[in-house]
Image (cartoon, grey):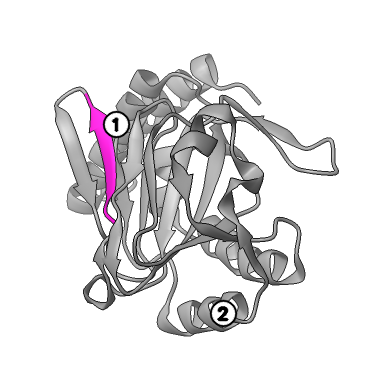
Amino acid sequence: MLIAIPDLLAAEELARVRAIVEAGDWIDGNVTSGVQSALAKRNRQLAEGSEAAQRAGGIVLDALAAASLFVAAALPLKVFPPLFNRYEEGETFGAHVDNAVRVRRGSDFRLRSDLSATLFLEEPESYDGGELVIEGQFGEQRVKLPAGHMILYPASSVHRVEPVTRGRRTAAFFWIQSMVRDDGARRLLFELDEAVQGVAASNGQGDPSVIRLTGVYHNLLRRWAEC
């Protein structure tokens, strides 16, 4: 399931994140790569755990907590502290699959990567190339969103970043461990939640159908959730 989260960052938050990462210390992006990824990856990255990464990441985490669409789609249990990468002309990240378990350096924090997220920080017209290409059941999905928008997708999918041919592509990226491990179950819960909200908008929250459907949603979540 691919879900676009529009305007995760408001204009003021986006400007703050951009200013922070612009002044940060950019290093070789392969510092966080696995063996497979290191063969395909050419980009730059803010040093994990650096002051700039922590400050900018904190803004992103606060925005995620307030984003109802993200919470409904991801049902997050843990979120890996956001990292930040940059692709300039000729840089790319070939086809790969994200590691199943992500460990934060220098800590005992770890999570199972059920979902991957990319938060775009540059306007799409400011660079050429750089599309995030996600391979799925129905073919490839090419994603290049406005600054401040985010794409959420299964971490198990094969994906790549096309070469940048003009300008630069800057983004935040991170992983989420969901309370609901199974992607199919998570999709059903998301669709049910959307349906409940639609009925509530038409009939009101107190409508008996809304109450029953809400009960079904929470009973399914109770059955499938790992907390």
Residue that numbered label 2 is attached to: 22
Please name the residue shown 14% across and 26% down the image.
138
Q: Is residue 69 magenta?
A: no
- Identify the secondary structure beneath mark 1: helix
Stretch of the chain drawn in magenta: 130-136
User: 164 and 55: which one is in front?
Assistant: 164
Residue that numbered label 1 is attached to: 192
- Identify the secondary structure beneath mark 2: helix
Displayed quadrant of residue 56:
bottom right
Please name the residue shown 54% across and 60% down the image.
44
Query: Of the residues shown, which amino acid type is indicated by label 2?
Result: Glu
Give me the disc on residue 200: none
User: 50 and 95: which one is in front?
Assistant: 95
Q: Position of residue 222 (x, y in %)?
A: 53, 20
Q: Say if residue 80 shows up in the picture.
A: no
Please name the residue shown 39% across and 57% down the image.
91
Query: Of the residues shown, which amino acid type is indicated by label 1?
Result: Leu
Please name the residue shown 32% across and 28% down the image.
187
